């Protein structure tokens, strides 16, 4: 389980920020409505909703990230309630919110079934939900697979497969079925997000030096294995570079789910 307070998630939050308006657009109108942003991190989506006039609660398991979200809200003069807790056990009454969102956050829940059920419970009958997940391809997928393989190898195991594998958030059918069991009907579309950096090496180092998932993994597998992974990852990052001027640019595809209770 990653410790999201470690490192500097702010770097990744900045990279994925361009996806936030699309999620907010999917749940419009939001003015005056009670909104819950799950795994809000540093507040990208929560602040976007607040700017549009929603009454927002940002929910996350990482105290430091909630603090950052609060500081950002204060700097903009926005109201943002912040609550810390587990995605699989929301501390809110039934039918508490008219809007539920998450930008690449819900996908890290340790219990997808429980989280989907909790969302179905706290979302009002006429409410709206929108969230994003990564398509299972490309650079991010490779990095995730590398991390899983490294941890499994450290413990003398093979990466989990079949029924033991993590839930496939990039599988449109699986996600829609998961939420239908909790009374939520979703539709999905594929979007693109471009990430840029000064070079492939700079991006690789920022991930390994600053991303909470990677830093947590370093504590598990040790420094030597971690640095070996860093070296192995760099040519893969370079192979996904779409820029020709020495900088780094990569287009990532993601899924935007939106829907409501039925």
Image (cartoon, rainbow, N blue to C red):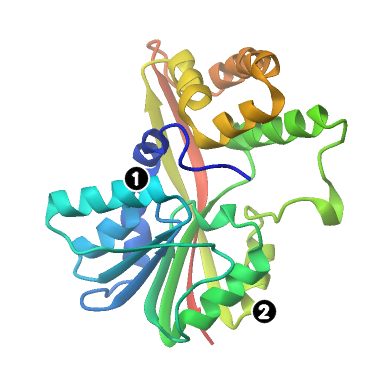
Residue at 45% from the left image edge and 50% from the top image edge: 62
Name the foreground residue: 80 vs 143.
80
* As drawn, 78 above or below 92: above
**Residue position for label 1:** 17
| Image quarter of residue 141 | top right
> Which mark, residue 239?
none
Asked whether residue 241 is in view, the answer is: no
Quadrant where the N terminus sits is top right
Left/right placement of residue 96 relative to residue 229 reads: left
Counting residues from the N terminus, which is met first, the one under dot 1 or under dot 2?
A: 1
Mark 1 neighbour density, 10 Å: few (under 14) some (14–19) many (20 or more): some
- Secondary structure of residue under mark 1: helix
**Residue position for label 2:** 181
Name the foreground residue: 154 vs 236.
154
| Image quarter of residue 230 | top right
Residue at 49% from the left image edge and 51% from the top image edge: 104
How many circles with numbers are drawn on the protein? Answer: 2
Image coords of residue 150 (percent x, y)? 74, 28
Left/right placement of residue 32 relative to residue 89 reads: left
Image coords of residue 259 (percent x, y)? 48, 74
Residue at 21% from the left image edge and 78% from the top image edge: 32
Left/right placement of residue 154 relative to residue 122 reads: right
Extreme-left residue of the structure: 77
Q: Mark 1 touching mark 2, by CB under 8 A? A: no
Image coords of residue 72 (percent x, y)? 22, 48
Asked whether residue 204 is in view, the answer is: yes
- Secondary structure of residue under mark 2: loop
* As drawn, 236 above or below 127: above
Distance (Cα) linking label 1 and label 2: 30 Å
Mark 2 neighbour density, 10 Å: few (under 14) some (14–19) many (20 or more): few
* As drawn, 219 above or below 234: below
Image coords of residue 206 (percent x, y)? 45, 23
């Amino acid at each position: 389980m990653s410790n999201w307070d470690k490192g500097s998630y702010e770097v990744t939050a900045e990279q994925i920020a361009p996806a936030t308006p699309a999620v907010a657009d999917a749940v419009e109108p939001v003015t005056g409505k009670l909104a819950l942003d799950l795994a809000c991190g540093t507040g990208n989506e929560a602040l976007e909703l607040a700017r549009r006039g929603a009454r927002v609660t940002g929910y996350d398991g990482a105290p430091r990230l909630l603090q950052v979200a609060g500081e950002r809200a204060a700097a903009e003069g926005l109201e943002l309630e912040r609550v810390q807790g587990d995605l699989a056990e929301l501390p809110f009454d039934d039918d508490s919110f008219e809007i539920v969102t998450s930008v690449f956050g819900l996908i890290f829940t340790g219990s997808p079934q429980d989280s989907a059920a909790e969302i179905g419970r706290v979302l009002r009958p006429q409410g709206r939900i929108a969230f994003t997940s990564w398509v299972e391809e490309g650079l991010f997928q490779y990095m995730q697979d590398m991390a899983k393989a490294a941890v499994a190898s450290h413990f003398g195991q093979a990466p989990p497969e079949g029924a033991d594998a993590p839930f496939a958030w990039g599988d449109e059918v699986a996600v829609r079925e998961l939420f239908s069991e909790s009374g939520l009907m979703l539709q999905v579309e594929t979007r693109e997000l471009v990430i840029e950096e000064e070079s492939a090496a700079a991006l690789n180092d920022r991930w390994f030096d600053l991303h909470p998932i990677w830093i947590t993994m370093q504590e598990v597998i040790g420094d030597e294995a971690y640095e070996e992974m860093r070296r192995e990852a760099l040519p893969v990052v370079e192979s996904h570079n779409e820029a020709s001027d020495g900088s780094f640019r990569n287009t990532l595809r993601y899924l935007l789910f939106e829907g409501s209770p039925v």
